[in-house]
Image (cartoon, grey):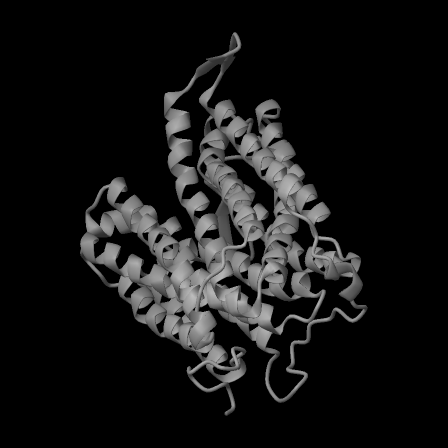
Amino acid sequence: MDFDLDARILTLALARMVDAVANSFLVVVLPLYIERVVDLPAFIGGTITLGPVEFSLTSALLIGVVLSLFGFLNSLGQPFTGRLSDRTGKRKVYLLFGLALVAVGSAGYIFLTDYVSILALRALQGIGAAFTVPMTVALVNEYSEADQRGGNFGLYNTFRLLGFGTGPLVAGVVLAAGPYRLAGVDVSGFDAAFLVAVVGALGSFALVTLLIEDPEQAEAEAGEDLSLAVRNPDGPGLDPVFALGLATAVMALSFAIFAPLANAINARLGQSDFLFAVQFGATVLANVLFQLPLGRLSDRYGRRPFLLGGFVLLLPATLAQGFVTSSELMVLLRFVQGVAVAAVFAPSLALAGDLAKEGQSGSTLSLLTMGFGLGIAFGTLFSGILVGFGFATPFVVATLGGAAGLVLVYTQVGETVTDAAGIPAAGD
C-alpha cells in the first residue's frame, strides 16, 4: 500500500510541531521562573489541614498547581470545543483562536510577575490548547482517506512529539545563554524564552492561516445529534470510542508517572540527571521513530492487532521500571514503553476516525485527546503520592491500569479495516 503525503496534513503536523516546541518550552521555563522571579503569596511556608491530612504550602505545590491547571483545562475543555466546532462546521477559525490565546499567554509572562497573574495566564493557555488540539486532529481525520488514516495520524504524532522533545532542550540553551541585548534593550533569559514561545505560536498561526481551509463537507454534514454514548448503540457493552478514550487515558498515565520521580529514580539507580534525561527521552525517541510506520501498518493489517499488541508490550515495560536497578536497563525499558505507546496512539486515533460520522470528527476524536491529556495530568499528580508507599507502587498501579485498558480494547473495540487480516473483532 502506497502512502500519499497530503500537503495539508504535513502543514498541520508542522504547525503542531512548532506549537509543541513553544508549549514544552514553558514546561521547563515556568517552574524556574516562578521559583526565581514571581512574587509568591505570603502564605508560602504555612500548612493547611484537610481532615487527618496536613499539607505544607510550598513553592513546589504552587508550581504544580500552575502546571496541572493547564492540563486539566486543556483536557476537560476539548469535548466542548470539539462539539462547538462540529455544530458550526468550522475548524480553522477555532484553531486560530486557540493559537492566539496561547500566544497572548506567552507574551503576558514577560510583563506580569505576580502568582495570580501567572495562574491566570496558564489557564488562558489551557483554554487555548483546548481549541487547538481537537480542531487539528479533526482536520487530519477529515483530510484523510480511509486507507491512509493511520499513516496520517502517525505523521501528525511524529511531528508533535519532535516538537515536544526538542522544546525543553532549546529552552535550556536559551536560558543558559541569557541575558541578551536586542535592539539596545536588555532581555533576560526568561523573557527570551517567552518570546520564543510567542514566535512559535505565531508561526503556527501563520501556517494555518495561509495553507489550511475547512473541508467543504464539514458545514453541510454537521448534524444536530452530536451526543457520544457511553453505551454501545449497536449492541451490549461500551461505545467503542468511549472505551478507547479510557484505554488512552491509562496508556498515557503509564508513561507520565516517570517524570515526577526524577529524584527518587536517580537516587535508586545512583545516576546523574543526564542519565535520567536520556531515559525520559528514550520514550519520546521511540514514539518519533515508530508512530508513522505503525500507523501505516494499521492501515494495511487493521487497528486491533496494534492496539492489543501495544498494550501487551506496555504492561511488562511499565512494571519492570519499578524493580530495575540498572540505568541501562531503564533506558531500554523506557524505549520499549515508547514503542508500545506508538502502537496504541496512532491506530486508536485512526480507529476513532473510522467510526466518526460525517461532521462529527471534533466531538469523536476529542474523547481520545481528552483521555490522553487527563492520563498525563493524573499520572504526574498521583506519581508523587504513590511513591510514598514504596518506589515500585506507581509502576504497579500504572500496570494494573494498563491491564484494564487491554481488557477494554479486547472486549469493547472492534476492527474497522474491513479487509484486514488481523485479530477478529470484539465479540466475533
**Rendered image quadrant of residue 100:** top right
Residue 216 in the image: state x and y as whole percent.
73, 57
- Res. 47 in view: no
In this view, 338 is above or below 165: below
In this view, 256 is above or below 193: below
Residue lying at 49% horizontally and 24% vertically, measured from the top left: 192
Residue lying at 33% horizontally and 65% vertically, measured from the top left: 318
Judge from the rendering whether residue 410 lies leftward or rightward of residue 278; answer left or right. right
Judge from the rendering whether residue 309 lies leftward or rightward of residue 182; answer left or right. left
Residue 309 in the image: state x and y as whole percent.
37, 74
Image mark count = 0
Residue 104 in the image: state x and y as whole percent.
65, 33
Q: Nearer the viewer, residue 53 or 165?
A: 165
Residue lying at 53% horizontally and 67% vertically, measured from the top left: 350
Q: Nearer the viewer, residue 342 or 247?
A: 342
Judge from the rendering whether residue 194 lies leftward or rightward of residue 105; answer left or right. left
Residue lying at 48% horizontally and 40% vertically, measured from the top left: 21
